[in-house]
Amino acid sequence: MKPDKKKAYINLRIYFTVIVLAEVFGMLLLTAGLTKALGRSFHFSLDYIAILTMLFFSLLIGYSVNIFLSRFFFRPITRLGTAMRKVAKGDFSATLDPDIRIREIQNLYRDFNTMTQELGATEIIQSDFVSNVSHEFKTPINAIQGYATLLQGEQSPEAEAEYVNRILLNTSRLSDLVGNILLLSKLDNSSLERTVTTYRLDEQIRLSLVLLEDKWTEKDIDLDVDLDEIEYRGYENLMAHVWSNLIGNAVKFSPRGGRVSLRLNLNEALGQIIFTIEDEGPGIDEAALSHIFERFFQADSSHKTEGNGLGLSLVRKIVGLSGGLVTASNRTDGTGSIFRVVLPRDRYEEETL
C-alpha cells in the first residue's frame, strides 16, 4: 500500500512575500543580463555598484509592499478567519466592522454579518420549533396514556366507549400534527414534487366542503356558498390543503347554528382569483392578527379548541408558492373573522413543471 502523501502548506503571507521577492529578483537578473549584453554590443562598462544599489532598493520596495498588503489585505482576512471559527463553534453573535477601505473586503464583511444574523435567527426558530413540537406531542400522548390507564380498570361500557373515543381523537391529532410537520418540512426544503395541472377550482372547494360535512353538520352550520366556475392551473394537491384548513377553521370557531360564507370570484381586470370565507366566531384578537400565520401560533392561548397552530402556516406557504397572498381580518360588526386568498389567474398558463 502506498503511503499517503502529505501536502505541504505554507502561510499565505510568506507565500506572497516569496512571490514578490522572486519577481523583483528575476527582474534584476533580467536587467543585469540585458545591461551586460548591451555593454558588450555597444562597448560601455557595466556598473556593478549601480546594480547592487538597484537590488537593495528593490528588496526594500518589495518588503514595503509586503507590509502594506499585510495591513490592508492579510489582516482583514485573518479577522474573517477568526470570526468564522467562532461561527463554526456555534457563536452566531460574531460580527465584523465593514468600515474598511477595500471595497471587496467591505462587501465580504457585510455578507458575513448578514450570514451570522440569518444563522442566529434560524437557530432561534429551530429552538422554538423543537420546543413547540415537544409540547404539541406531549399533550395528546399524555391524554392517550391517561385514558389507556383508565381502561385497565373496571369501567362501565359507556365510560369505556368514551375513553376509546378520546384515545382515537388524540391519535388523530398526533397523525395530523406529524402530517403537517412533514409537509411543511418538504415545502421548506423544496423536496416535495410539485406538479401543475389544470382543474376546476370551484369543484375543488366543493369537494373540501363534502369531506368536512361531518363537522359542519354536527354543529348545524348554515353554509352560504357562492362560487364562480373557474378553471385554474396550479398545484392541485397542495391547494386542497388551503381550502380544508380555512373551511375547517371557520367551522371550528363558529358557534352552533352559525353561518359560514364562502365566495369565489374572478377579477378579469386585475387577473386575480379571489376567495373569501367568513365565519361568525369570536374573531381574532387585534394583537394576534399579525402573528396568525406563524408556526405553532394559536390565538386561543387557552387551547380550548383543537389544533396545533400549523394549519394557517401551511396555507400561507402554499399560497405563497402559488404566487398569491392570504390575509386575515375581523368583520366590521365584531362577530367573526374573514380570510381572503388572492391568486394570480394566469401564472402557470404556459409553464409546465
Image (cartoon, helix red, strand yellow):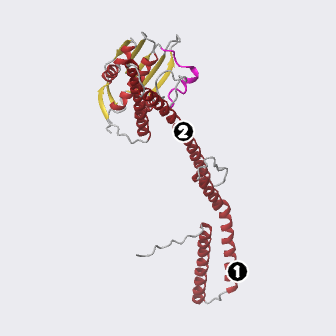
For the point 61% across and 55% down, the residue is: 80
Q: Nearer the viewer, mark 2 or mark 1?
A: 2
Work out whether residue 200 or residue 307 is closer to the camera in this orientation and state it: 307
Provide the residue span drawn in magenta.
281-295
For the point 52% across and 26% down, the residue is: 298
From where the camera sits, is residue 273 visible? no
Quarter location, residue 168: top left
Q: Main secondary structure of the magenta part?
A: loop
Q: Position of residue 280 (x, y in %)?
A: 47, 13
Please determine whether, in this image, residue 304 is positioned above or below residue 53. above
- Looking at marks 2 and 1 on the same chain, the residue that comes earlier in the sequence is marked by 1
Q: Position of residue 13 (x, y in %)?
A: 62, 67
Helix, strand, or loop for circle 2?
A: helix
Work out whether residue 64 or residue 177 is closer to the camera in this orientation and state it: 177
| Mark 2 surroundings: few (<14), some (14-19) or many (≥20) residues within 10 A | few
Q: Position of residue 58 (x, y in %)?
A: 66, 75
Work out whether residue 288 or residue 195 is closer to the camera in this orientation and state it: 288
Quarter location, residue 257: top left
Cα distance between the residues tagged 2 and 1: 65 Å
Q: On the picture, is 50 further left or further right than 30?
A: right
The number of numbered discs placed on residues in the rendered structure image is 2
Circle 2 residue = 125
Residue type at the position of mark 2: Ile
Circle 1 residue = 53
Q: Position of residue 295 (x, y in %)?
A: 50, 32
Residue type at the position of mark 1: Thr
As for residue 284 lying within the magenta part, the answer is yes
Please determine whether, in this image, residue 241 is positioned above or below residue 191. above
